[in-house]
Image (tube, rainbow, N blue to C red):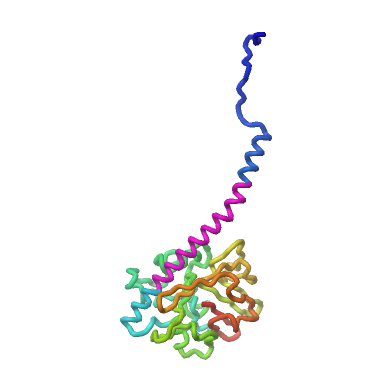
Amino acid sequence: MGTRPGRHPNPRRDGFTLVELLVVIGIIAVLVSILLPALNAARRAADKTACAAQVHQLLLATQMYLNEQRHYPDASTIPAFGGPVPCCVRANLLNAIGPYLNWPELTGAETVDRLPRLAACNCRLQQETLLDPYPPPAFGLDFWLTGYGYAAGIMDAGSASAAALKPERIADRRGKRRGVVWGDYLIVLNAASAPGWGYFHQVGGHHFDSATTTTPVPTSYFGHHSGWSDGSVEWQGRGTLSLDPLQADDAATYRVGAGLTIHCYF
């Protein structure tokens, strides 16, 4: 039999049906759910590798300063804590090692994201908070929260409020003993109300107080680097350390302050 005039035996259909569109959306959603964790893991691995390389560069520059001056750059005592606080990075420290890294002279007024690239942890720069230097009225001296901490010579400052909880991990000012010089920021701030953990290498959701960049429960902690005076960079991953604030004196490397204290892990 012939076909009716004006009718095609296989009429063309344009577009998708609603069912087909929902199937495609479902497939895309499944693929995203599979790929997203892998992409996040790859990003964390890249951040970790880049951070380790930066810590190594800071170590090399600080070692060159030691070779010329016969001591490491001096750590700054923060008046509010009565002793050196490793995570409080000041312009005088960065200017001391700046010539070895071809950095311009810093005034101390720069924001963290305007510092020389190696001076701030790449994970810290992903948090757009507290980029301005802390003003002197806050803690007694101006400083930056760069995501890194400087530990060399902190026990040579003669501070009564500073305590070496693991002295074998702290580099002395003259470089006579192997110890940590630079590392990622990992602290617990013990205030009168409740402890708060500070760190920037994170996994999963991370919610923190924007005024202090600390969180009361460190479930998103991923790990941190410790850069030793011999040039090695150690990674301490999640689960390596106890993050129970009641065990801070046993797990941390250094404590400073009275009343308001900071426990530093490196």
Outermost residue on the left side: it is 68
The reply to whether residue 145 is in sight is no
Quarter of the figure with residue 10: top right
Quarter of the figure with residue 259: bottom right
- The x and y percentages for residue 160 are 52, 91
- The x and y percentages for residue 246 are 65, 81
Q: In the rendered picture of this protein, how many numbered marks are placed on residues?
A: 0
| Residue in the foreground of this view, choosing between 183 and 76 | 183
| Residue in the foreground of this view, choosing between 161 and 233 | 233
- The x and y percentages for residue 231 are 40, 75
The reply, left or right, for residue 262 in relation to residue 110 is right
Which quarter of the image is occupied by the N terminus?
top right
- The x and y percentages for residue 38 are 56, 55
Q: Is residue 42 magenta?
A: yes
Q: Is residue 212 magenta?
A: no
Q: Which residue is drawn at 60% across and 66% down?
A: 220
Quarter of the figure with residue 205: bottom right
Dominant SS type (magenta): helix
Instruction: Give, as a single range, the part of the protein colored magenta.
Output: 30-58
The reply, left or right, for residue 159 in relation to residue 195 is left
The reply to whether residue 153 is in sight is yes
Is the residue 14 above or below the residue 51 in the image? above
Is the residue 78 above or below the residue 29 in the image? below
| Residue in the foreground of this view, choosing between 154 and 91 | 154
| Residue in the foreground of this view, choosing between 50 and 87 | 50
Q: Residue at x 53, y 83 (%)?
A: 254
Outermost residue on the front side: it is 1
